[in-house]
Amino acid sequence: MHDESAVGSREPLVSVIIPVYKVKEYLDTCVKSIVGQTYRNLQIVLVDDGSPDSCPMLCDEWASRDSRISVVHKRNGGLGSARNAGMKVSTGEYIWFVDSDDFVDLNVLEQVVSAAQRNQSDIVIFSNTNDLYADGKYSMIGENPVIEFTANDNDEFKDVFGRLTDAYLAIPAWNKLYRRAFLQEHDAWFNENVNVAEDQIFNMALYPHARKVSGVVVRGYHYVLRPGSLSSNTFNPKTLESRLRAYRLVHDVLSDWNPDALNFYRNELLMQISVIVDSLYVRHGGLSAADRLDIINEIMNDDDVCEAAREAKTLSHRNGYIAWCVRHRFVIGLKVYGRIVAGMKNLRRK
């Protein structure tokens, strides 16, 4: 076993929490990128969320090879449940959530921790690249760069928040280092009753309370898009419920804290509604025509969807079309949209 217990004793301990579920093809790449970090004082918590493949064994093998790694085996409960299980056993001064199908350049944490200490930050936000994994290879298809900043109070953070949302940097948890005492002070836990938008709900509850926030130009976190992740799955009613729950929380927080940022999240909801609508028409979805019509009517009658459609300054033609259909209660328009988009996706799968 590789023992790092004496390394970096003068450096703050960082707890790296990695939920693991059905990622056997990606897990080794992820964990290698963490154990190889130039910042050595780590507590690495692999949370096996009841994975039915070989991931539980792979996690135990990694723990036998590096003394900094521990494994939590638990019944499947979803991403929020797995992260919470990791937080419960974490002891580091800082916490970092890493997705188990992503990977990280080896010098990322050293730079991020340095910024956290230099600025006494509650949260440090850093850049990421978007990488597509196909045919056993990773290829970068985009990036979300941070413009370096230091906000010394919440008003200063509020001033830069719009830039962060526009660059898709405000929502994820994996592009942030959190001061553990800050999370404890605000009793921060992930919502375990949603199947999407866990990060958004977690972060939005924290932002109005953050005293010091830093942004660093470190682009070494590789967010991986897997085959199939670019096209929607069959409809899941819990996904619609979770998206609406997340939007309500965001709307409530931003209405009081930062109303200028609401337009981005109205557009985000409209985009997610478009994804949900086309998922109704994915082949073999098991829904009848009456089922689909009921769901579309439920969407059109939802007060929050109507508010977003009415108030949004839409940022894309797609969002504009969805908003127009909702405002005018044009059910056939959403049905046609869903059929066309799902049909194109079905053709690409052949």
Image (cartoon, rainbow, N blue to C red):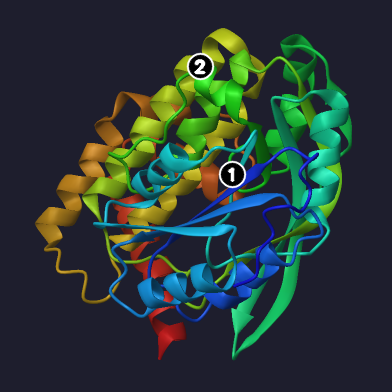
Above/below status of 10 relative to 121: below
Q: Nearer the viewer, residue 201 or 232?
A: 201
Above/below status of 122 relative to 6: above
Dot 1 or dot 2, earlier in sequence: 1
Mark 2, residue position: 253
Mark 1, residue position: 172
Above/below status of 148 relative to 77: above
Q: Quadrant of residue 55?
A: bottom left
The quarter in which the C terminus is drawn is: bottom left
**Could you say whether the residue bearing mark 2 is in a helix, strand or loop?**
helix
Measuring from the top left, give residue 324's x and y in whole percent.
46, 38
Q: Nearer the viewer, residue 290 or 143?
A: 143
Measuring from the top left, give residue 221's x and y in whole percent.
72, 58
From the viewer's perspective, is 194 left or right of 55? left
Query: What's the CA distance linking mark 1 and mark 2?
Result: 17 Å
Q: Which residue appears at 22% of the width and 38% of the height?
A: 298
The quarter in which the N terminus is drawn is: bottom right
Q: Nearer the viewer, residue 116 or 176?
A: 116
- Give the crowd class for mark 2: few <14, some 14-19, many >=20 residues within 10 Å: some
**Could you say whether the residue bearing mark 1 is in a helix, strand or loop?**
loop
Callout count: 2
Measuring from the top left, give residue 8's x and y in whole percent.
79, 48
Q: Quadrant of residue 149?
A: top right
From the viewer's perspective, is 103 left or right of 8? left
Q: Which residue appears at 34% of the width and 66% of the height?
A: 233
Q: Which residue appears at 50% of the width and 16% of the height?
A: 253
**Which three-letter amino acid code belongs to the residue tagged 2?**
Val
Q: Which residue appears at 38% of the width and 77% of the height?
A: 57
